Image (cartoon, helix red, strand yellow):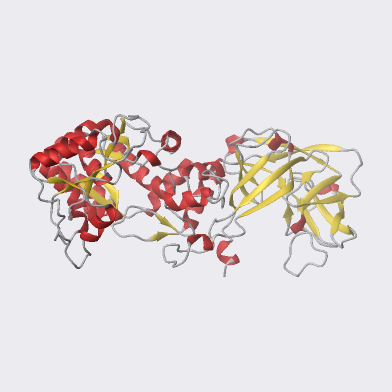
């Protein structure tokens, strides 16, 4: 028996499942499902549902089906189906059965006939606009349709004619006959079948009528004997209808339970709005690394472990809220800190010439691959008289608390030597184009016997051995924290600085040999990944996340 502490540690869904199992419900089985619409790419909000449904099945040694809700043929595509399956596998889950609502089109049609025969459904000739108008308002009852009293025989005949393609789209629909005065709008004779003369990706032209989501969802759950049908809170008002269909049709008593969806700061989690961004060319596609789709964040370098850890940290709640995207970014840093190899890269280079270092000499210096993982070992990096450093790491007139390079200042070059700035050269535009320094040969890292202490350590890349690269610095796509509270067009809140391209970056030689998808940390700069569109001649590199969260400071 669980202790009080253990019960408190469980989320409310786990407590419900424990109670069901203790009472012997569902023959001691736990069977969940993940039911996406194949009309777009999955986003970070779906990741929470994936982790919840598949995670519960794993925890209770149960089953989780992947069931595509493919009842809207004109909006569905095999491209989306394939991407959804790839996303789930990437997150580390596998489904027990791959199913489709279209698997049940025959059964669903028969259920609709069963409702007609019991006087619980009728064919309505009214337009969608009139049906909506007659449904009333939350404070005023609806008005019964003039076709509500049609005979069972007429309804059966008309519904069969709908199935046979004898009517155009919008001419007739099938509605459940429930209660036009119900305080729950969804119970006011909802449409359960409509004519759609569109080719279906699986059934082709076999059907020209399709069930609505509300009619297909609960019955599909029942046919699969789903014990716990988990939906986000926006479907709470649909639960009475879900139960009504199951009761009227005398089906397996699947049960719907709602939980809070994932709303993330500075992020849109709506497939419709994300599609608007793609089609309006505000981003470079569904997998643009600024997008919150799972395909995009995978391309950006977010890890599956980080996503699962984030889902665990935010937990499962009964009320909607907004989770801080900084927590997601922290989860990514936390994971990559353990896994990512360290390399040297300079994004905005300026040349540093060490004037007293022998010309033409190159030495190989040992560098630690990952200080968090001894088994990662070491590598060697080339060092010579000329190196690149970050332009921001030099100031000709630095303030007191600036600990990087400036005239007469000493810094350590990571893994190399202490150098002292002796001068610099400007171009005609007045910009510094070269910095000069002298090194102390007795200060070699790991062999320093001088006892010298410096406050600044700089990253660098050997100029002779540097590999040219394009580095894309991705930031948050939106500049407004809570996009749920805005009154204007959400696109007005796009962050104009969400992408900065550093086209003249210099990276150490090992980076030029990395395959696409390789993740690493540019020391002192952040975590990065080799992009899928990278070329051998010039690597394309995406920033996954900076080393620290500077967003709050920048936007005060």
- Figure quadrant of the N terminus: top left
Q: Vertically, is 442 above or below 132?
A: above
Residue at left offset 30%, top offset 43%: 169
- Front residue of 184/209: it is 209
Asked whether 441 or 459 is in front, the reply is 459
Q: In the figure, is residue 517 to the left or right of 538?
A: left
Compared to residue 202, the image places residue 255 above or below, namely: below
Q: Is residue 453 visible?
A: no
Q: Position of residue 326 (x, y in %)?
A: 50, 57
Residue depicted at 57% across the width and 67% down the height? 555
The answer to which image quadrant residue 70 occupies is: top left
Residue that appears at 53% across and 63% down = 492
User: Is residue 468 among the parts visible in the rendering?
Assistant: yes
From the viewer's perspective, is residue 365 above or below residue 322?
A: above
**Position above or below: 60 against 346:** above
From the viewer's perspective, tell me whether residue 365 is left or right of residue 237: right
Residue 405: where, in percent of width, then height?
A: 79, 59
Q: Nearer the viewer, residue 76 or 292?
A: 76
Residue 215, image x, y percentages: 22, 43
Q: Is residue 146 left or right of residue 345?
A: left
Residue under the point 45% across and 46% down: 307
Total marks placed: 0
Residue 478 percent coordinates (x, y): 53, 59
């Amino acid at each position: 028996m669980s202790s009080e502490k253990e019960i408190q540690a469980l989320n409310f869904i786990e407590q419900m499942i424990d109670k069901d199992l203790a009472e012997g419900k569902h023959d001691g089985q736990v069977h969940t499902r993940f039911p996406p619409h194949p009309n777009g790419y999955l986003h970070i909000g779906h990741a929470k549902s994936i982790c919840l449904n598949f995670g519960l099945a794993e925890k209770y040694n149960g089953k989780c089906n992947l069931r595509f809700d493919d009842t809207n043929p004109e909006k569905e595509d095999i491209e989306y189906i394939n991407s959804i399956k790839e996303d789930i596998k990437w997150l580390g889950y596998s489904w027990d059965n791959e199913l489709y609502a279209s698997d049940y089109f025959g059964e669903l049609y028969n259920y609709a006939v069963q409702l007609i025969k019991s006087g619980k459904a009728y064919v309505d000739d009214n337009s969608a606009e009139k049906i909506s108008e007659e449904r009333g308002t939350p404070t005023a009852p609806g008005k019964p349709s003039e076709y509500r009293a049609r005979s069972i025989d007429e309804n059966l005949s008309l519904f069969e004619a709908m199935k046979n393609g004898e009517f155009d789209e919008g001419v007739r629909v099938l509605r459940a006959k429930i209660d036009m005065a119900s305080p729950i709008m969804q119970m006011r004779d909802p449409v359960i079948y409509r004519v759609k003369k569109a080719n279906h990706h699986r059934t082709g032209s076999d059907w020209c009528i399709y069930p609505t989501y509300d009619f297909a969802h609960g019955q599909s759950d029942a046919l699969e004997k789903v014990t716990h049908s988990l939906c986000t809170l926006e479907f709470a008002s649909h639960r009475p209808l879900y139960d009504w269909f199951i009761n009227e049709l005398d089906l397996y008593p699947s049960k719907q339970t709602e939980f809070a969806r994932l709303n993330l700061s500075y992020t849109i989690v709506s497939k419709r709005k994300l599609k608007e961004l793609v089609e309006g060319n505000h981003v470079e596609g569904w997998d643009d690394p600024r997008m919150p789709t799972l395909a995009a964040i995978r391309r950006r370098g977010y890890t599956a472990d980080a996503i699962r850890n984030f889902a665990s940290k935010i937990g499962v709640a009964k009320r909607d809220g907004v989770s801080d995207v900084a927590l997601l970014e922290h989860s990514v840093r936390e994971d990559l800190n353990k896994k990512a190899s360290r390399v040297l890269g300079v994004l905005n280079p300026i040349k540093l010439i060490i004037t007293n270092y022998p010309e033409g000499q190159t030495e190989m210096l040992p560098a630690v691959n990952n200080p968090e993982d001894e088994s990662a070992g070491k590598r060697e990096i080339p060092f010579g008289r000329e190196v690149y450093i970050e332009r921001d790491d030099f100031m000709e007139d630095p303030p007191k608390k600036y600990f990087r390079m400036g005239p007469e200042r000493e810094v350590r070059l990571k893994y190399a030597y202490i150098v002292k700035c002796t001068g610099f050269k400007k171009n005609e535009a007045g910009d510094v184009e070269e910095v000069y320094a002298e090194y102390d040969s007795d200060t070699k890292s790991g062999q320093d016997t001088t006892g010298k202490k410096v406050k600044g350590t700089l990253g660098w890349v050997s100029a002779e051995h540097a590999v040219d690269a394009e580095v894309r610095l991705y930031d948050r796509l939106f500049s407004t924290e809570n996009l749920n509270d805005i009154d204007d067009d959400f696109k007005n809140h796009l962050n104009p600085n969400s992408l900065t391209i550093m086209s003249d970056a210099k990276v150490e030689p090992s980076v030029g040999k990395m395959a696409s998808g390789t993740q690493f940390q540019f020391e002192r700069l952040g975590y990065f990944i080799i992009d899928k569109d990278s070329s051998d001649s010039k690597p394309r590199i995406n920033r996954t996340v900076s080393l620290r969260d500077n967003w709050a400071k920048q936007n005060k």
